[in-house]
Image: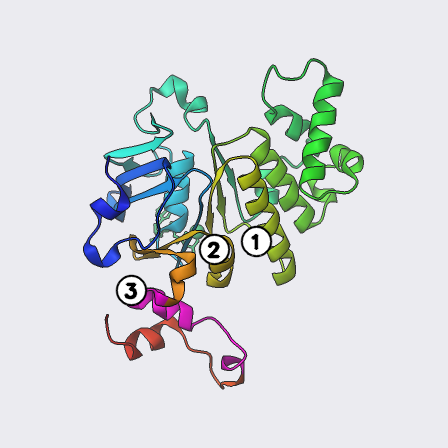
Amino acid sequence: MTTLTDSVAPETKSTHEAPSPVLEVVDLTIRYGGVEKIHPTSFTIGTRERVAIVGESGSGKSSIANALGGFIPPGVGEVAATTMSLSGRSLLDLPAKRIPDRRQGISMIFQDAMSSLDPIWSVGSQLMAVLPKGRYGSRKERAAAAEERLEQVGIVDPRRVMSSVPGQLSGGMRQRVMMAIALASEPELLIADEPTSALDASLAVSVMELMTGLTVANGASLVFITHDIALARRFADKVLVMQKGEVVETVAARDLDHARHPYTRGLLQCMPTLSSAQLDRLPTLDTVMTEEPAA
Ligand SMILES: Nc1ncnc2c1ncn2[C@@H]1O[C@H](COP(=O)(O)OP(=O)(O)OP(=O)(O)O)[C@@H](O)[C@H]1O
Ligand SMILES: [Mg+2]
């Protein structure tokens, strides 16, 4: 079996001891209009592992998430890999008739819950539609299970929310509903693409606490994309750092301060701190990258 540490150059070696892999990706490439935007990329994600993907805008974070989730149809881009498998099941080259099933085991949450939820269906009907089939005998049991799922994501009045349409809820509530829907199908892997960037800082932290807590409690692994390296440090076990279509460093979150790649160190230096708040200008990635010599 090829692991990240086997398949990357020595300077990008992981400092993180991963649990047994649930997701294995070897030499994933993504092309749009014939242009390679994700260069051969390999990584693994372990059972119950929480992985953050960070990197500047356009570095390829969403492309990787969308490729894993099956959101890059052939007309949009070409996804190729030596291996891309979830619990040993290949996510590549499945016959067309199996497309609705191909991402079984993976759920996704996006930045804007409103664009992922159906605006005219009630929350209850959208949630009940994704509960595991055949488990609940009656509609009443299904509705009770859906209410329970809403309670788990911190919704205190689940009955009202069940009968609401998404537009009647606040942004934070919608993101909680998205989380309940994403977890209702009992995925092995939850992928969240900037799940908190539309929320204010304190709400972002409580949504992250909930998401990491629930995925681990459900025995699922989590990949979350963020521009906020402080959230990555706090909520991830492992951080993949992307730059220009490549994973340039994989580092245990607890070792972020010892990150070796200049780009990762640049990202860390761009984090506002109490002392930088007194500077006339905050450092930018361009300034710190040019000031810091390559490791
Ligand atoms: N559907 C698409 N068609 C053409 N090019 C695309 C498409 N999606 C992404 N790209 C290109 O692929 C590269 C990576 O984009 P991607 O959206 O994956 O980056 P990102 O790291 O998620 O950025 P951001 O932080 O802004 O969300 C960019 O050059 C982008 O223009
Ligand atoms: Mg993105």
The dot on residue 196 is 1
Above or below for 129 versus 236? above
Residue bearing mark 2: 226
Whole-angstrom CA distance, mark 3 to mark 1, is: 26 Å
Q: Which contiguous range is marked in magenta?
A: 258-277
Q: Quadrant of the N terminus?
A: top left
Q: Choose the circle earlier in sequence order: 1 or 2.
A: 1
Q: Is mark 3 within 8 Å of ligand 1?
A: no
Q: Residue at the spot x=47%, y=57% of the render?
A: 232
Residue lying at 26% horizontally and 36% vertically, measured from the top left: 81
Does the image show residue 2?
yes
Query: Ligand 2 closer than 8 Å to the CB at disc 1?
Result: no
In the rendered structure, the answer to whether residue 101 lies left or right of residue 141 reads: left
Residue under numbered circle 3: 261
Q: Nearer the viewer, mark 2 or mark 3?
A: 3
For image coordinates 41% across by 47% down, the residue present is 62
Sooner in the amino-acid sequence: mark 3 or mark 1: 1
Residues at marks 3 and 1 touching, judged by CB atoms closer than 8 Å: no
